[in-house]
Image (spheres, rainbow, N blue to C red):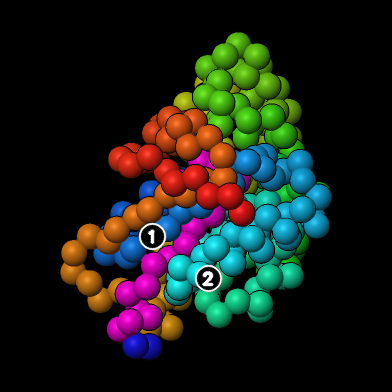
Amino acid sequence: MSKEINNNPIGFFDSGVGGLTVLKQFRELLPSEDCLYFGDTKNVPYGEKTKDELIKFSGNIFEFFEKRQVKAVVMACNTTSANVYNELKDKYPFKIYPIIQSVTNILAKLPVTTIGVFATQATINSHAYQKGINTLNKNIKVIETACPDWVKIVEEKRENDADSLTKIKTKTDEMMNLHPDKIILGCTHYPYLINQLKQFAPENIFINPAKAFVEFIKEDLRKNNLLSDKTSNGNEKFYVSANPENFQKAGSMFYEITERPELINL
């Protein structure tokens, strides 16, 4: 791989601020990479959208990244990984990393008998985590629970409202009554809610897949000779499809965004 391509940026995208939980882990592991982040805040939440809508939104973002000559795109969104990766994976000239498919092999090796999954309705409907884990390990029982309100709670910074806490408690209590050994936070927005979740269940029961995901990406970039050879810290740029101020404010809980995101009309 030429140095020119080697040092091209990596694109990250999500419906909003959720993917910043992945970007944060990535920057800690690979600080020299240049990163572009697109938050599709005009269309948040993705979990309520149809498959055709998700293909359209993701395709527009992929084309946006293609024009910026990215060397890879990270689908920092469980909903799109579950629903559109197979439709888009062969249409673009860059590597594509979907979060679910990249981490289920690790989850399937956990020494557990029951795994819970909190995710959006679209991800739950796809059964992507259950299929991915049970294809590799049929002995793990996978319990899936949709939490359709949680993305909006994060995007609107309402995580400590009484109504929000009730919704979080209700879903957590339902899951804990089924006695899972671990619970996957199967939406990249959900780690924002860990301070609320641990009020209703032990903190160590929750799994944020982001760390395993970025470790997988690093190894794959290395194998494909796509790692940057720069010694300085990489640059980063943020784009949104609506409400840049809200994105910057909501995302600040997990990631320091020093410059106002650029508004892009796709």
Q: Is residue 7 magenta?
A: yes
C-alpha separation, residue under disc 1 versus residue under disc 2: 13 Å
- The image quarter in which residue 176 lies: top right
Left/right of residue 232 with respect to residue 41 in the rendered view = left
Q: Please name the residue shown 66% across and 77% down the image.
A: 91
Identified by mark 1, the residue type is Cys
Placement of 232 over or under 258, stated as above or below: below
Q: Residue at x 66, y 79 (%)?
A: 90
| Part of the protein shown in magenta | 3-20
Examine the rendering and report whether any part of residue 75 can be seen.
yes
Q: Which residue is mark 2?
A: 66
- Give whichever of 1, 238 is nearer the camera: 238
Q: Earlier in the sequence, mark 1 or mark 2?
A: 1
Q: Residue at x 56, y 39 (%)?
A: 242
Q: Judge by depth and name the residue closer to the eye, 206 or 12.
A: 12
Task: Give how far across and how far down residue 237 sits, in percent.
Answer: 38, 53
